Image (cartoon, rainbow, N blue to C red):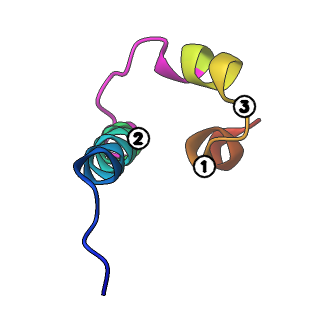
Amino acid sequence: MKKETSSNLLEKIDIAKERIKELETMINHWEGIECEGFWDVECSINPSSPGCLLFND
């Protein structure tokens, strides 16, 4: 088994952090906690993100 390079590992960590942020926002939305303007900004930047596809009107 090959040893992963540190840059590859750091990239995976960054991706995981972004996904955690998306999931926290979705949970906050479902729990009724205010997420001011997040979906407008997120969906204008990345309209095919899982959250935008889920909440697209």
At numbered mark 1, what does the secondary structure look like: helix, strand or loop? helix
Q: Is residue 12 left or right of residue 39?
A: left
Residue 30 picture location, percent across and down: 39, 46
Residue 33 picture location, percent across and down: 29, 30
Q: Is residue 49 left or right of residue 16?
A: right
* Residue toward you, 38 or 11: 11
Q: Amino acid at mark 1?
A: Pro
Which quadrant of the figure has residue 1?
bottom left
Does the CB distance between marks 2 and 1 fall below 8 Å?
yes
Residue 2 picture location, percent across and down: 31, 78
Tell me the magenta residue range: 28-39
Q: Residue at x 26, y 44 (%)?
A: 10
Q: Quadrant of the C terminus?
A: top right
Q: Is residue 42 left or right of residue 32?
A: right
Which quadrant of the figure has residue 43?
top right
What whole-number distance in Å separates the C-alpha atoms at marks 3 and 2? 13 Å
Q: Which residue is mark 3?
A: 47
Q: Which residue is mark 1?
A: 50
Q: Which residue is mark 2?
A: 22
Asked if the stretch drawn in magenta spans residue 56, the answer is no
Asked if the stretch drawn in magenta spans residue 32, the answer is yes
* Residue toward you, 44 or 32: 44
Q: Residue furthest right?
A: 57
Crowding around mark 2 (Cα neighbors within 10 Å: few <14, some 14 to 19, many 20+) is: some
